[in-house]
Amino acid sequence: MEYTRFEIARIIGARALQISMGAPILIHVPEDLIDPLDIAMYEFKKGAIPITVKRKAQ
Amino acid sequence: MYLIVEQEDVIRIPPPLLGEDIDQVLEDLAREKIEGNVYSFPREEVKDPAERKYIIVLLLSLEKVGEGVIVPGDGAVYQKVRFKALAFHPELQEVIVGDVVDALKFGAFIRFGPIDGLLHISQIMDDVIDVDVENKRFIGKESKKVLRVKDKVVARIVALSINDANPRQSKVGLTMRQPGLGKFEWIEELAKGEKKEEGGK
């Protein structure tokens, strides 16, 4: 599924919050990535985030 | 009265637990949240608010309903679940069997199921009652009947107020001043006495 920029922002935002709250990171990330937001964006780029979007009108 | 109920609830799964086996985590969290908690029947089914509530004693089975949802502002996953559970539902006028667990100057506490009820001194028997607080017992002045801690009794629920936040603090009022109620031994004696009377005629 192709995500809109709003959906991407929501997914990365939710994932970054999870990581900041202590959720385990799903893939191996470079050691210099410290900020939860950076890690979430890296995970998203690699397609590793297990979050989908439910659209109301399909 | 005990019953088996089937209903839905939503469980919050905190982010740190997301890496573990999700079904196991969900079961543990559900047990923690649901067991020992007060739920109520739908408004349309039971009119009287005091009669609506019941306490979940044990979770029997649990299944996920749909996918988990992440709400704005919280990183946790909210998973809807459907569960079957054993529930305790005390009703007004219900006759219960319990144990005397404590004796104080104003009455006795009777334990039945997951909660305790108060049996006021005026409701123990048809007699004036002497309270022996030191030995934790009640003595009928004329009948000489004695009620002690650990005695098994049959009593009727006459007042009921279940505390949602803390079910153990629920207030249940009991009485034993009716035929057929009281300590097991009293009931047996009463039954024996009646039989003798019948035989004498």
Image (cartoon, coloured by chain):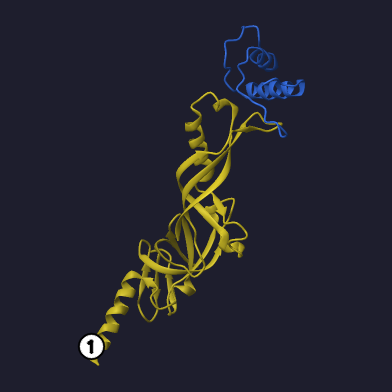
Chain colours: A blue, B yellow
Residue at 50 percent of width and 25 percent of height:
B20
Q: Residue at x 59, y 27 (%)?
A: B15
**Percent of width and height locating residue A5:** 76, 20
Q: Residue furthest front?
A: A58
Is residue B191 shown left or right of residue A44? left
A53 to B40, vertically: above or below = above
Q: Nearer the viewer, residue B88 or A52?
A: A52
Q: Which chain does tag 1 point to?
A: B
Most foreground residue, B88 or A15: A15
Where residue A37 appears, x then y in whole percent?
A: 70, 17
B168 or B86, nearer to the observer: B86
Which residue appears at 57% of the width and 25% of the height?
B16
Q: Residues within 10 Å of mark 1 (few under 14, many from 20)?
A: few
Residue highlighted by disc 1 = B199
Name the quadrant of the C terminus of chain B. Answer: bottom left
Residue B13 lies, with reference to residue B96, above or below; the image says above
- Seen as rendered, the residue at the extreme bottom is B201
Relative horizontal placement of residue B152, taking residue B72 as reference (left or right): left
Residue B145's quadrant in the figure? Answer: bottom left
Find numbered disc 1 in the image and state the secondary structure of the residue it sits on.
helix
Q: Is residue B28 left or right of residue B164?
A: left
Residue A16: percent from left, percent from top:
67, 21
Residue visible at 67% across and 21% down in the picture = A1
Query: Which residue lies most toward the left here?
Result: B199
Q: Quadrant of residue B42?
A: bottom right
On the image, the x and y values in percent for residue B101 come to: 41, 59
Height in image: A9 above or below B60?
Answer: above
Amino acid type indicated by mark 1: Gly
Which quarter of the image is occupied by the N terminus of chain B?
bottom left
Label total for image: 1
> Relative to B18, is B57 above or below?
below
